[in-house]
Image: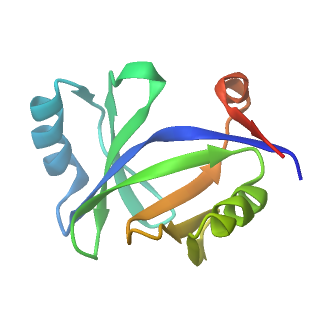
């Protein structure tokens, strides 16, 4: 199935650290402006505004080990998961409204729904 996808941004997973506290460090370190933390579906996030190329950079409070992961956005997340599986990725699980994947290199990443405004800049597949 033809679909589109592109790099959406980077998520800084911070184990057991309040999002506001993590955002204070990472905003100063990266020179981005930290927005107030917010909760969504039981998770805690804080956006860092000012990343180049319109990339989304945010911190997320998590229970697992701290790490950085990237998000790929697609207008068809199932088709994108299929495409990436054909390249050697593995589906770890579906969480809320996105696929958690693992690359052949062991890196985790997510496939999230693409916004309408972002589709013009995306890669076309299929």
* Front residue (pair 54, 17): 54
Q: Residue at x 20, y 42 (%)?
A: 23
Q: Is residue 108 above or below residue 58?
A: below
Q: Is residue 56 above or below residue 111?
A: above
* Front residue (pair 47, 85): 85
Q: Residue at x 22, y 73 (%)?
A: 65
From the top left corner, tell me how far across and down residue 40 is, in percent: 48, 56
User: Is residue 66 shown left or right of residue 118?
Assistant: left
User: Is residue 19 shown left or right of residue 56?
Assistant: left
Name the quadrant containing residue 37.
top left
From the top left corner, tell me how far across and down residue 62 is, in percent: 30, 68
User: Is residue 72 shown left or right of residue 2?
Assistant: left
From the top left corner, tell me how far across and down residue 82 is, in percent: 73, 65
Q: Residue at x 71, y 59 (%)?
A: 83
Q: Residue at x 53, y 68 (%)?
A: 100
From the top left corner, tell me how far across and down residue 118 is, in percent: 65, 28
């Amino acid at each position: 199935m033809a679909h589109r996808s592109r790099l959406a941004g980077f998520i800084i997973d911070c184990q057991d650290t309040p999002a506001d506290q993590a955002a204070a460090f990472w905003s100063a370190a990266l020179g981005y402006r930290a927005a107030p933390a917010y909760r969504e579906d039981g998770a805690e996030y804080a956006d860092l505004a000012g990343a180049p190329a319109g990339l989304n950079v945010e911190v997320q409070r998590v229970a697992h080990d701290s790490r950085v992961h990237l998000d790929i956005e697609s207008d068809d997340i199932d088709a994108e998961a299929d495409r990436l599986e054909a390249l050697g990725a593995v589906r770890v699980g579906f969480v809320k409204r996105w696929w958690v994947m693992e690359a052949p290199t062991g890196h985790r990443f997510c496939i999230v729904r693409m916004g309408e405004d972002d589709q013009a800049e995306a890669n076309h597949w299929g």
